[in-house]
């Protein structure tokens, strides 16, 4: 395949008539491909050209129609003028935790760490850095570290914790 002067002249003529690169390659034949035609056109600097006869007929473009982002429903008849219901806001409910009643453990029942036994409540009372620090010492159910009251404080159901 070689670009002879006759082929180059035919290429220029067909290009100016508006034929596509594929059509020109078909006319030239003998090993000339569409890509070879495009490359030669660029090397020759043939930029401007007439429109192809098929494309000279003006095309009418249809307007692009899209679906509405929020479809409107048409209301007809006796409900057309009915006022639309507005959605009601959810009432704001404040969660107020139940006040924790302090159990007053008499000083006589409070125990130090040295007096603490297996069946006694281990709930700490006071500041551990002071000499008055003690544990609850009330009787606790077998297998639990706290008395019934302190067990309710220590072990809250997971649903109650999520609400807060």
Image (cartoon, helix red, strand yellow):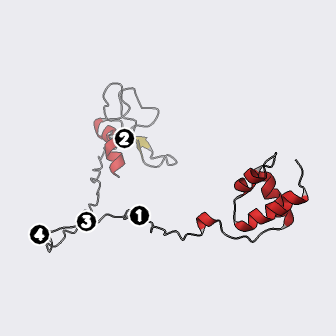
Nearer the observer, disc 1 or disc 3?
Answer: 1
Outermost residue toward the front? 6
The image position of residue 152, as x and y in percent, is 31, 40
Which residue in the protein does label 1 denote? 66
Residue beneath the point at 52% across and 68% down? 59
Q: Quadrant of residue 82?
A: bottom left
Mark 4 neighbour density, 10 Å: few (under 14) some (14–19) many (20 or more): few
Mark 2 neighbour density, 10 Å: few (under 14) some (14–19) many (20 or more): few
Checking the image for residue 154, the label placed there is 2
Nearer-N-terminus badge (2/3) = 3
Checking the image for residue 77, the label placed there is 4
The image position of residue 92, as x and y in percent, is 27, 63
Nearer-N-terminus badge (4/2) = 4
Secondary structure state at the residue bearing disc 3: loop
Q: Are the residues at dot 1 and dot 4 in contact (C-beta closer than 8 Å)?
A: no
Which residue in the protein does label 3 denote? 89
Nearer the observer, disc 4 or disc 2?
Answer: 4
Disc 2 to disc 1, C-alpha distance: 60 Å
Secondary structure state at the residue bearing disc 1: loop
Residue beneath the point at 14% across and 74% down? 81
Q: Are the residues at dot 2 and dot 1 in contact (C-beta closer than 8 Å)?
A: no
Disc 4 to disc 3, C-alpha distance: 30 Å
Disc 2 to disc 3, C-alpha distance: 37 Å
Nearer-N-terminus badge (2/1) = 1
Nearer the observer, disc 4 or disc 3?
Answer: 4
Disc 4 to disc 2, C-alpha distance: 64 Å
Disc 1 to disc 4, C-alpha distance: 28 Å
Q: Nearer the viewer, residue 43 or 163?
A: 43
Q: Are the residues at dot 4 and dot 3 in contact (C-beta closer than 8 Å)?
A: no
The image position of residue 122, as x and y in percent, is 40, 36
Nearer-N-terminus badge (1/4) = 1
């Amino acid at each position: 395949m070689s670009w002879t002067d006759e082929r180059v002249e035919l290429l220029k003529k067909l290009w100016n008539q508006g034929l596509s690169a594929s059509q020109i390659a078909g006319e030239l034949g003998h090993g000339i491909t569409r890509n070879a035609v495009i490359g030669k056109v660029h090397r020759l600097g043939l930029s401007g050209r007439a429109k192809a006869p098929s494309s000279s007929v003006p095309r009418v473009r249809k307007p692009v129609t899209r679906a509405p982002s929020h479809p409107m429903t048409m209301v007809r008849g006796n409900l057309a003028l009915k006022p639309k219901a507005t959605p009601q806001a959810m009432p704001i409910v404040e969660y107020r935790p139940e006040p924790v009643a302090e159990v007053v453990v008499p000083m006589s029942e409070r125990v130090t760490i040295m007096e603490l036994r297996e069946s006694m409540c281990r709930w700490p009372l006071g500041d551990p850095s002071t000499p008055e620090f003690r544990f609850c010492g009330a009787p606790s159910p077998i297998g639990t570290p706290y008395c019934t009251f302190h067990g309710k404080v220590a072990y809250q159901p997971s649903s109650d914790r999520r609400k807060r």
